[in-house]
Image: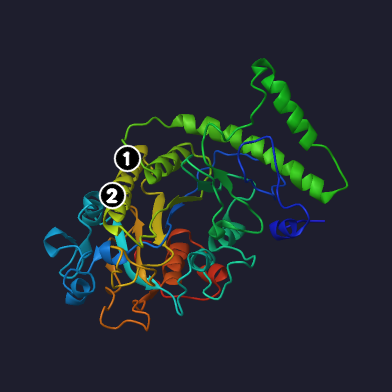
Amino acid sequence: MAHSRRDFLKGTLSLLTLSLAAPTFSFESSKAFAAGTSPNKILVVVQLDGGNDGLNTVVPYSDKAYYAARPNLAIPETSVLKASDKVGFHPVMTKFKGLFDQQKIAVIQNVGYPNPNLSHFQSRAILNRADPTTREEVFQLGWLGKYGDLKSNSDNPLSIVNLGDGRGSLALPKSLVGNKILPSSINSFPLYQFLTDAQYPSDRNNQVNTFVKSNSANSTSSDFLYIGQTGLDAVSSSESLQTGIKKYTPAIKYPENSLGVQLQMAAQIIAGDLGAEIIHVTLGGFDTHSGQKDDQEELLTAISESFDAFYQDLVRLGKADKVLVMAFSEFGRRVRENGSAGTDHGTSGPMFVMGNAVKGGLYGNSPDLTNLDSAGNTVFDIDFRAVYGTVLSDWLQTDSQAVLGSKFENIGFINK
C-alpha cells in the first residue's frame, strides 16, 4: 500500500531515530537518490522570526504621524537612507541600500492579510501555509511543501533544504510540510553524515554497509519499508552533500552572525549542484517589545551585510541568474511605541525580494498611519499571497492557483 507523508505522521510512529545526526529526510523516495542535476531556478526563503518592525526598516520619513507616534524610536530624517521622496532605509542598511540602488532588490510595502492575528504561532502558521483561516495546531500542508509535491524531484532528499546555524535546535518550518517530500534539515555540515563508532575508525565502511544492508531488507510491512528507504536516503544525501560542498572555495567574507552562517551554507549547497530547489533559512530575535533600538540595529545590520555577501558570492560562483531570495516576517509592529522603548505586535510590514531577475524598486504604498485599525495597527495594502503567487508563477514557473487555492494579483517584480 502506498504511503503519503500525512498517512505516516498519522500512524503510531511519530519519531524516527536514525544513526545520522540529521533529523529529517524524504519519506517517499522509491528510487535510488542521485544528485548532480542543477535546477534552473532556486528560491532561498529568509524567515525573519519574531515580527520585524517594518516602520523602522522601511522608514516613512515624510510622514509626520510616524514621528508623532514614535518620539523616542523614530529614525531621524537626516539619518534615513532615502529610497524615494517618501521612504528610506534604516541607516545601518547601507549595503542593502547599495543593492537596492543597483535594482537587485524589490521592496513590497505594507504586506498583510484580512483579519490579522497577533499571535506569533498562529501568524507563522498563516504565512507558512498561505492560509489566513488555518489553525496552528491542525496538520496542514505548507505552501512550499505543496510546491514540492507538484514540481520538486521527490527522489532527491536535497531538493528542499532547511538550514540552521549549528547553534541550537532546528525545527522544520511549516511552510515546507508536504505529502510527497520531506526536506532535509541541516544544522551543521560536519554532523550531517553517518556517525560511526569513533573507537573503531578503520571499521567505518563495514558499519555503513551493515546499516545500508539492514535498511535494504525486504518486508511485508509498508512502515518497515518506509523507514528503510528513509535510512537509505539519509546515507545517500549525506554522502552527496559532503562531496558537493567540497566544490566551494570561500572567497567572500560573510558577517559572523546567524544569517551570514546560513547564507554561506546555502552558497555551498548551490555551488555543489546538489539539485536544491528550495533553501530555507531563519533569523530570529525580532520580537522587540523592549530595548528595540540596539536589537533591531544589530538584526538589520545582519540582513544588510549577509544579503550583500550572499549576492557577491552568487555572482562569483556564476549562479546569480539562478537564485532568488525572498524575505518575510510573520507580522509587523504596532505604530505607536510602548513604554519599554519597544513596539508591540502589529499587522502589515514589508517583504523583500533579491536577485538578478528582480525588477528592483518599491511596490505598493507606504502604510497610511492616519488610517489605523481599532488596535492602532496598520491596514494592509498587498496580500502576502500575491507575493507568493508572483514568485510561484514568474520564478518557479508553477501554477500559483494549484498551490495557493486562488488567483492573486501579479505584482510584477520579476523579469520573466
Residue 361 seen in the figure: no
Q: Amino acid at mark 1?
A: Pro
Residue in the foreground of this view, choosing between 382 and 288? 288
From the image, tell me which residue sits under label 2: 301
Q: Which x, y percent locates residue 407?
A: 49, 76
Quarter that holds the C terminus: bottom left
Left/right placement of residue 357 relative to residue 218 reads: left
Identify whether 118 is placed above or below 148.
below
Crowding near pointer 1: few (<14 within 10 Å), some, many (20+)?
some
Left/right placement of residue 228 relative to residue 147 reads: right
Question: At 68% across and 34% down in the image, what residue appears?
Answer: 19
Crowding near pointer 2: few (<14 within 10 Å), some, many (20+)?
many
Tell me if label 2 and label 1 are in contact, CB under 8 Å: yes
From the image, tell me which residue sits under label 1: 255
Residue in the foreground of this view, choosing between 136 and 8? 136
User: The residue tagged with tag 2: helix, strand or loop?
Assistant: helix
Left/right placement of residue 84 relative to residue 127 reads: left
What distance separates the C-alpha of mark 2 from that of mark 1? 9 Å
Q: Amino acid at mark 2?
A: Thr
Q: Which x, y percent locates residue 189?
A: 52, 35
- Residue sitting at the far top: 202
